[in-house]
Image (spheres, helix red, strand yellow):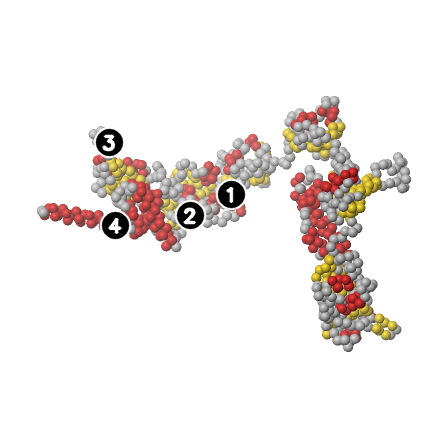
Amino acid sequence: MSIRTILVGVFTIFLFSYQLALAQNSSLLEQDLSKVQVDQLSEAQIKKLAEAAESRNLSDQQIETTAVMRGMPRAEVSKLMTRLRSVKTQMSSNNQQGPTNRGSRQDSTLTDTSNATGVSVELSKEERKVFGMELFGNKDISFEPNINIATPKNYQLGTGDELMVNVWGASRQSYILEVSREGTVTIDNLGPIYVNGLTVEDASERIVNRLTNIYSGLRSNNGNRPNTYAEVSLGRVRSIKVTIVGEVRRPGTYTLSSLATAFNALYLSGGPTFIGSFRDIEVVRNNKVIASLDVYDYLVKGQGANPIFLQDQDIIRVAPYSTRIELKGEVKREGYYEMKQDEPMAEALRFSGGFTDQAYTHRLRVIRKTNRAKRIEDLSGDALDSFLPQNGDIVEVDSILNRFENRVEIVGAVFRTGTYSLNDGLTLKELVEKAEGLREDAFTSRALIYRKGDDLMTEVMSVSLRDVLTDRKPDIPLQREDVVRIFSIFDLEEEYEVKIKGEVQAPGEFSYMRGMTLEDLIAMAGGFKESASQARVEVARRVSANTSTASGVPVSENVQMANIFQFKVDKNLSLSAENAAFELMPFDQVFIRKSPDYEIQQPVTVKGEVLYPGEYIITNKNERISDLVERTGGLTSYAYLEGARLIRLNPEYYKELEIRKQEVLDSLQLMDIQRENEAQNDNSNTSNDNQLAKRALNARTLNPELLTTLAATNVEISETNAIGIDLETILNNPDSKYDLILLPGDTLEVPKELQTVQMNGELLYPSSTRYDRAKGFKRYISEAGGFTKQSDRKRSYIVYANGSVDRTKSFLFLKNYPKVKPGAEIIVPEKEGGLSTQAWVGIGSTLASIALTIVTVINVANR
């Protein structure tokens, strides 16, 4: 083997090793990626690629595009992007502090806001009325420059921009070129190429022309088509500094992407202040105004097709507004609107979204400020395109009137009642035809036309409808808001009804119908109850004969007031065929009597010392206390007979309860009516008070138990009464006068023997003490401290455990005190008309004060 062959082999191995090290230490995006297998790349290489993309501010789309341009197959590109996103997610989760702004610094003159999203602004109520202000106070909007858009054609290259040059075809190569401070990019073997100030399109043409010196296949040769192609695109963009001054919330100098627009910069500064202009925002470049930004163009039409791209050292100047007006009333967006000098009122309405559907557009009211006062001007709806608003104008748009300019109405016996359009010359006959004609029950002799006069008072016109419809009389022209009422023959008749009362399932009033029979009415009432009597069904009929003479003097004092018809029912509570077919007349009243032998189960209760306490049903109307005790199995050995008592329902309580129930219902119904009236205030002219009350009454359904509870809170009478009984005498003398007959709801209480005696009333120390058979009435009084000075000893009494009462009796100077028994309560009342100790103390204090006053007056007089 020759030395030359050996040297070539060593050089080849060295070159391969060098390229391998270069591939490992440089970005994958700068290599030929046609042979790269993504599955063979390590996590470190993917992470390095992610960091490189982040440092160059490359988006996923740019990475994907670059990989394709470097020759990577589409399948491998998809794998690469999947792994790249996974690594980015992991890197983001490991960095809890969020991304850092490289090279950021903040001071009084310079703020690096390359990643800023605007100023957090809390707007006042008045500021929110300024159209456009909320755009800059919305935290959910971010106007960051979009670096993923296609390179604008008018974008001018400058220092810091990065160009990506890709060559493919017969030759493959890629270059990443950064514009130097001198405004040039450098390609090996070609030298610097000046691109500063050129558009990307012009720079691309210049670079490709220079590349033809290296790649001859880029140009046609001897008529042959090129076999090599080149493309130049913008990679990483440079940063620029822009100064924002004037009426903005945060003026200063901002570092932005060179792709940023004037709108991006304005948003970062927080937008104009309350007095700042939204319509004339100037962009100053090299001491010249090169463009003007109108925020309304963005808000109303969307940002224009030619956004204002900024350059380094540009100045954005926001001046105070010159003309601003206020729109109020029926516009879709009320608020302040800035107007340019030549813009008419119609343009302001366009900014506000236009009129609402309730707007009165015929005339607008303009309140204008003069040098001395305010002035009102009427603005016709036809002059909106020519009227030029002035600064401070307040434009008010009223709502249309709640009235119709061409409405008539027809009600009553026509097929289609309702409102209709009042056409020129509409007449009564034509309106009836529009309403599909008269119903069969129409009363044609007379119709009414309700018409409002000039003073808005309602007038009534009576017309013969039959004559108008048959052309016997001239037709009647209608006017705006006329209401035509056509009566039904049923409207002119008394409303007929029949009533059924007593033992049926649903008693009440029912509308009378011609041919209605007794059986029909009973069926409509749900049929007989089980308690209905078989003896009789009674029908009371009104007597319609005249009972007075023409002079008004009664014919007879014994005139018959009603006719009575009686019917029997069979054992199945059914009427015979003849009786069932009895035809009713208007106002008949049917009474279904209750069977005298029918009774529902009536409960009584036994509590205490019996063998089987609980609820029992009265077996007959003559059942007594002794019978009830016998049914319970008798008394236990612990029963205290002298303490037994009977608790009976108080009928007066239930009478009062029914009165209170009605009061509660009346109050609730009145509240319902008041609420309905409040809700109907807007339509008070057409509402009917009687119908309104009916709706209110029918609307409320109150639970009966809840109604009883509400009513019971206002009843002061006790629900039950305690009746004193002598159970021992009753049991020893059944059916005697002491053995009371039981009533439904009675409760018999048989306690155990009680061990105490209670002392209450005008005693020095009211208390209870143990019962002692040896102690008398006065002894118990002594144990309670004795009588007070206000005690009425003669009226002292005792209430025994069974509810009976005994009082102190006097004969001459002797007092006979009642006997004390276990469970008794001794009560000493206060003297009638007497004063308590506290009252005497109060009187004494008053008298002392009066005496002191008199002495003082006398002393003053003596001086």
Q: CA distance from mark 1 to mark 2?
A: 22 Å
Most distant residue in the front direction: 571
Q: Write down the residue under mark 1.
A: 130
Q: CA distance from mark 1 to mark 4?
A: 59 Å
Residue drawn at 76 percent across, 33 percent down: 492
Q: Write down the residue under mark 3.
A: 225
> Which mark is on residue 24?
4
Q: Disc 4, disc 2: CB below 8 Å?
A: no
Answer left or right for 455 relative to 70: right
Which type of secondary structure does the marked residue at label 4 adopt? helix
Q: CA distance from mark 4 to mark 2?
A: 38 Å
Residue drawn at 78 percent across, 43 percent down: 590
The mark lying in front, picked from 2 and 3, is 3
Q: Tell me the amino acid under the disc marked 2.
A: Thr
Q: Earlier in the sequence, mark 1 or mark 4?
A: 4
Q: Tell me the amino acid under the disc marked 1.
A: Val
Which type of secondary structure does the marked residue at label 1 adopt? loop
